[in-house]
Image (cartoon, helix red, strand yellow):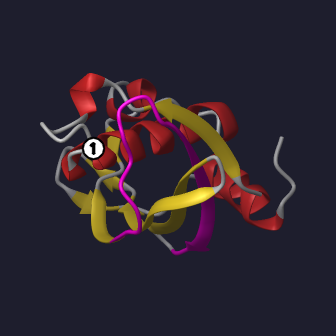
Amino acid sequence: MAFTTTHIVRFQHCDPAEIVFYPRYYEMLNATIEEWFETRLGASFAEIHGSMGMGVPTIAQETRYLRPSRLGDRLDFTLTPVRLGGSSLTLSVEAACAGEARVSFTTTLVWYAKADGRPRPWPDALRDAIGKEMEGDAR
């Protein structure tokens, strides 16, 4: 099941031409992923990176810039999980303004232990929650 959240393009996101400076898209992407983990999977980044001692870094990223986004635009970021591996997760994220596609991402994250930087299998609770999202049976 797709998850959608909205980000407003603020002055801080723009270059002097008042269009989104491309690294700012990655900040909005990460905020979307973080919100999805907390609201749909029930695991906040504060818990994951803090008390759990784990992390979910990006290990692969493909980005397509389709049209510029400008100061004041409301961008709807729609996240869809597409592949769940033993310790990896691939997400498709599309950003649009009023239905017009602006940028798309294919992002692969890995579940890893901060103590040694090694991948680990997804915990059962997260694996189950991600599986439900992929089946369209989200909470």
Give the labeled residue for mark 1.
19
Q: Is residue 88 above or below residue 30?
A: below
* Residue at (83% x, 40% y) in the render: 139
- Of residue 2 and residue 73, the one placed in the foreground of this image is 73
Magenta highlight range: 64-85
Outermost residue to the left = 16
Q: Quadrant of residue 99?
A: bottom right
Q: In the rendering, at what x and y percent does residue 108 appear? A: 40, 68
- Of residue 14 and residue 64, the one placed in the foreground of this image is 14
Q: Amino acid at mark 1?
A: Ile
Looking at the image, residue 115 sits to the left or right of residue 133; the answer is left
Q: How many marks?
A: 1
Q: Is residue 79 above or below residue 75?
A: below
Looking at the image, residue 129 sits to the left or right of residue 82; the answer is right
* Residue at (29% x, 71% y) in the render: 60
Dot 1 alpha-carbon crowd within 10 angstroms: few under 14, some 14 to 19, many 20 or more = some
* Residue at (30% x, 59% y) in the render: 58
Looking at the image, residue 4 sits to the left or right of residue 108; the answer is right
Q: In the rendering, at what x and y percent does residue 125 appear? A: 66, 47
Q: Is residue 28 above or below residue 100?
A: above
For the N terminus, give its image quadrant. bottom right
